[in-house]
Amino acid sequence: MRKFKWGHLYLVLVFIMLYLPIFYLVGYSFSDGERMSHFTGFTFRHYGELFNDPRMIQIVLDTLLLALLSALIATIVGSFGAMAINRTVKPVVRNTVLSLNNILMVSPDVIIGASFLIFFTALNVPLGFLSVLLSHIAFEIPIVVLMVLPRLKELPGTMLDAAQDLGATNFQVLRDVILPFITPGIFSGFFMAFTYSLDDFAVTFFVTGNGFQTLAVEIYARARQGISLEINALSGVMFLFALLLVVGYYFIQQGQSARKQKKGGR
Amino acid sequence: MRKNSNVAFYVPYVLWLALFVIAPMLLIFYQSFFDINGHFTLGNYVTYFQSGTYLAMTFNSVWYAFLITAVTLLISYPAAYILHYMKHKQLWLLLIILPTWINLLLKAYAFIGIFGRDGGLNNFLGLFGIVPQQLLFTDAAFIFVAAYIEIPFMILPIFNGIEELDEGLINASRDLGASPWQTFTKVTWPLTISGVKSGVQAVFIPSLSLFMLTRLIGGNRVITLGTAIEEHFLTTMNWGMGSTIGVVLIVAMVIIMFLTGERNKLKKGGKHHA
Amino acid sequence: MSEAIVELRHVNKSYGDTTVLKDINITLEEGKFYTLLGPSGSGKTTILRAIAGFLNVSGGDIFIAGKRVNDIPANLREVNTVFQDYALFPHMNVFENVAYGLRIRKVDKASIETRVIDALKMVRLDNLANREISELSGGQKQRVAIARAIVLEPKVLLLDEPLSALDAKLRKDMQYELRDLQQRLGITFLFVTHDQEEALALSDEIFIMNDAVVQQSGTPVDIYDEPINHFVADFIGESNIIDGRMVEDYQVKFNGKIFECSDAGMKPDEHVEVVLRPEDLDVVPAEKGKVTVSIDTQLFRGDFYEIVAYDDGQNEWLIHSTNPAPEDGTLVGLYFDPEDIHVMRFGESEEDFDARLESYEGE
């Protein structure tokens, strides 16, 4: 027990380190000054500025739309991709596809951004919403695959046999057995894809033109010009949003493990 | 009998593999053989290997990535280990993940405030009578902020590694007379090394290519491979040279992946930023 | 003789160099209980899967109700399977699981309702129709799996080791129920198991599989009494298998002595194996026995004593006796009747075996 107390202290320190900057950031969004030092009185002024900044609101909406749309498409493509990988019998093919799938997971964003930039230029795809959307879909697909694949592996082969045995066609097997079974994986995949999109800075930075900005790119531009407490206000809003996302994700996960326990407890 | 099922469903995925995984990698390789005027050349590679600047930059980049990884690992392993023995550990884990959901631009931005000449840290040090220091745009600040951002990505795979460890083995080791330290070095560490490897992989590779941190926190003093690529692509428009450095970075990445084993476990929220 | 409902003719299956089925010829008649019995890897489940349509055979023909079904996919074959792991759909409740096949067949709602309830009544689960699968015990899941298959009124019900996941007691109960169910439904059951007791207890006819080949088929009594070869004798029940030579018809020599037996049709002085079942051996005083052995160990098995003894050639003898043997080390005699001796030839085909038995047993 004694050593655990030291352990707790250590963890508390780590958590302070992780959260202090975030609270510092959000805290100053309520400061009545213009700089991120010397808190000078409480105000909602910066939030007011934020919500009266049509450019910023447009960017937030664009970013959300981009995240939703790309995550949706990536989830569909990725789920079917996972099924394709799962039914590949030859280990060589399977491992090759899996390795290729993971390339975009491990590649540094700069490389993804730069290579996509070359790719879009070569194909004459105009840089803007379309190129950003395609890029986001591209780097979200592998995570969807990785979230769906374990669920598919858990699906017993006999269950597919059983459905077929009872008369189901391939399509009916997919609709009645496979999809319901992997739904939690699909949800997690969609969720992860969504957050990846929101989080991305570097890839977007490379492949976006002048016409289209995401939040991250906009923050980068503003941060390079110096401190603006409007960004802090935005952080406050985003922190709240992230909190909601995390809580949402937590419940998806809990739902998933509860299901597992149920299954295990014969 | 179920082979001939709807292949059409898989076409988008295969197209994606071809267009967005294979083609871009080939293109960046191809591009590295062209100079700024679009002529075929090996000059980029010659420049790279002959100019001291590029080699020094590469060495610097690797050195910083190493430091960042080491600092991150040092902080993360004990944290993951303690976390494993906590009640409600899933909840604590979630709290570790939560910061990764805050856009890292915002976190970097926070440190501009904290490390500023007039910022939080200098004010805090002022309480002890220490005169304000230049903190922002130092190497230490760069490494600290990078480590700060990477910590969750290191804790997660290590935590998963420790979770997979059979508690019975720890008990067996203790039962056979090993001290806690011996148990740790002979049982726990070797069996969780794969988690550490994935963590190192998840941290080292992105650290090689961080570019926005070098600008916002490092104040352009630190130039990494990532910064150089960004500059060649978006500022000097010398895509050939940028691609050459990109190829070097890819090679470095492959080496790291090879060294840390092919085990490539899924890291929750393990997406990386430059 | 009733109609052949399933027929396999010269069925082969191999994966690369590995042959899992070698020239299988099986005929299943209507309304009987068949068992495919064999150790794991013997090919018994492969036969089941070939009939169900989950795999394509490499050669030969499969007929169901007189129709060649080699090219008919599993979902269109009129057979249904009960899987070893039950393979119930976890996202559907008991009723929905059983109703699934009917819904696929677009049966109208009212009939679905009655047929599902009827099927559940058959397995005595009609009171659990609205339960979730996760809330069921192993035995209940088993019944749902059966109900889900029989509700479609298949021509043949295929059961892939359905009892193997149940504990011993429940397993016994389910054996009775399965047998009873089969008789009430009157449909053909093809049951796969590696448990010889189960096979003996349930079946009208058993196919014994080993090494991709059907070793012997017949009623449980026939197979037990007249095993065709070493493998079958060893696999079914317990046995003492001794090397011997056939001196002439009805005379076999083993342990250095010539014994009278009830087998014939071998070549003179042919090398054979002799089977003596442990329960056919009686422990008698040394001078009255046909073989003299020394008691080594004995274990009380509840309904009998299992005694291990050695003869002077250090051959092991297994004896099942209702009475305890004298203390360890005692020399005793073993007595058996001529008809307790069963002689097996090496490498005799099932056809030749049947013909030979026919030739002298009919008399």
Image (tube, coloured by chain):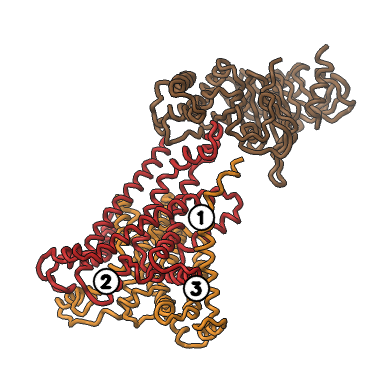
Chain colours: A red, B orange, C brown
Circle 3: is it few (<14), some (14-19), or many (20+) Cα within 10 Å?
A: some
Query: Which residue corresponds to mark 1?
Result: B13
For the residues labelled 2 and 3, the Cα–Cα distance comes to 29 Å
Numbered badge on residue B252? 3
Residue situated in front as seen by the camera: B247 or C362: B247
Residue A22 visible, this angle: no
Residue B121 visible, this angle: yes
Q: Position of residue C151 (x, y in %)?
A: 51, 23
Q: Is residue C330 left or right of residue C144?
A: right
- Location of residue A133 with respect to B28 vertically, above or below: above
Could you tell me the amino acid type at mark 2?
Tyr
- Location of residue C18 with respect to C274 vertically, above or below: below
For the residues labelled 3 and 1, the Cα–Cα distance comes to 28 Å
Circle 1: is it few (<14), some (14-19), or many (20+) Cα within 10 Å?
A: many
Q: Quadrant of residue B235?
A: bottom left
Could you tell me the amino acid type at mark 1?
Tyr
Q: Position of residue A175 (x, y in %)?
A: 47, 40
- Residue ID at (70%, 42%): C14
The subunit letter for the residue under badge 2 reads B
